[in-house]
Amino acid sequence: MRRHLENTDFYINEFLLYEDAIPAKDGASHISMFLGYWFIRKAMWGSPSAIRENAASLKKFYTFMREQGQIDPDELQDLKETITEKMPEWVGTLERYVDPDITDPKKIWEL
């Protein structure tokens, strides 16, 4: 439980407030930017398991937000589908990012 709180705190207080302050209730649509790009670049402890753990924490958080009426069911469903569909891509990007043999950003981010 503590880890979920720490992960959610990092998402809200670091990512959502990083450039433009995004209210947590509006953050569900930013999950791909967080786990697929920002987390990879900013979380020095990033690993495939850390991405999966953060995804689980955010699913729990946004499920709670749905229960509180802060987001609608479609937003929660979209978040869960995005996590399921994009997880392999996010993990692959992180693995390329930490690979010392890959120095070309185009190859890391598959541009």
Image: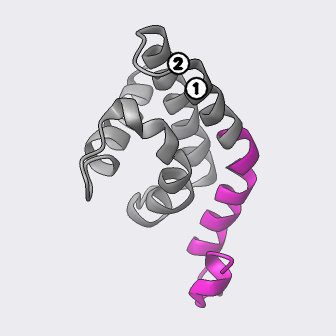
Give SS at disc 2.
Answer: helix
Relative to 46, 9 lies left or right: left
Relative to 85, 44 lies left or right: left
- x then y, percent, for residue 29: 51, 42
Which residue sits at x=63%, y=85%? 106
Distance CA(mark 1)–CA(mark 2): 7 Å
Q: Are marks 1 and 2 in contact (CB under 8 Å)?
A: yes
Q: Is residue 77 magenta?
A: no
Q: Find residue 76 and name its label.
A: 1
Q: Residues within 10 Å of mark 1 (few under 14, many from 20)?
A: some
- x then y, percent, for residue 30: 48, 47
What's the residue type where badge 2 is placed? Thr
Relative to 14, 37 lies left or right: right
In this rendering, the answer to whether 48 lies above or below 76 is: below
Give SS at disc 1.
Answer: helix
**Which residues, given as a range, are shown in magenta?**
83-111
Q: Is residue 102 magenta?
A: yes
Dividing the picture into quarters, in which one does residue 105 lie?
bottom right
Q: Quadrant of the C terminus?
A: bottom right
Q: Find residue 35 and name its label.
A: none
In this rendering, the answer to whether 42 lies above or below 6 is: below
Marks 1 and 2, the one that precedes in the sequence: 2
Question: Which one is nearer the viewer's eye here, 65 or 46?
Answer: 65
- Of discs 1 and 2, which sits in the foreground? 1
Question: Which one is nearer the viewer's eye here, 98 or 71?
Answer: 71
- Residue wearing tag 2: 63
What's the residue type where badge 1 is placed? Leu
